[in-house]
Amino acid sequence: MSEAGLLALRSTASGLTSPATQADDLYELISRRIAVSRSIAITANRAPRGWYSLLRHPVVAESLLDGLINTSQQVVINGPSYRPNIRPKASITKA
């Protein structure tokens, strides 16, 4: 964690935790930040209700989402993905 308190996580950071403990690890991280009034910025491609299927433990998922949702300001951005604009064009070669 930096001096400013910034901790950047990526869902693709495989190997940092096992799938069996990811929900618990995320819960612990978020709980600690909420307890000391640290800001949390989360970006996701699904609504919080869609997280339940990703988090293996229903009780941990409910507690984690309850803590996040009840202390948050949500900004929903609808629209097309920007990713097609930044992907390199696939080249088509003839054999």
Image (cartoon, rainbow, N blue to C red):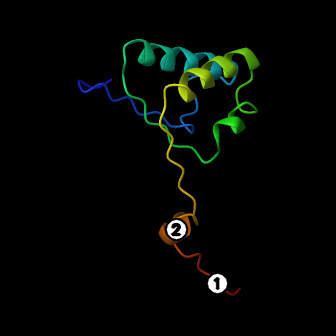
Q: Which residue is mark 2?
A: 87
* Quadrant housing residue 89: bottom right
Give the crowd class for mark 1: few <14, some 14-19, many >=20 residues within 10 Å: few
Local SS, label 1: loop
Q: Is residue 38 above or below residue 35?
A: below
Q: Say which amino acid is labelled 1.
A: Thr
* Quadrant housing residue 69: top right
Q: Residue at x 64, y 36 (%)?
A: 48
Nearest the eye: 40 or 87: 40
Q: Say which amino acid is labelled 2.
A: Arg
Q: Residue at x 51, y 65 (%)?
A: 82
On the image, the x and y values in percent for residue 13 come to 53, 35
- Does label 2 or label 1 sit earlier along the sequence? 2
On the image, the x and y values in percent for residue 42 come to 49, 37
**Quadrant location of the N terminus in the rendered image:** top left
**Quadrant location of the C terminus in the rendered image:** bottom right
Left or right: 48, with 73 as reference point = right
Give the spatial CA distance, label 2 vs label 1. 18 Å
Q: Which mark is residue 93?
A: 1
On the image, the x and y values in percent for residue 73 come to 47, 37
Q: Residue at x 64, y 42 (%)?
A: 47
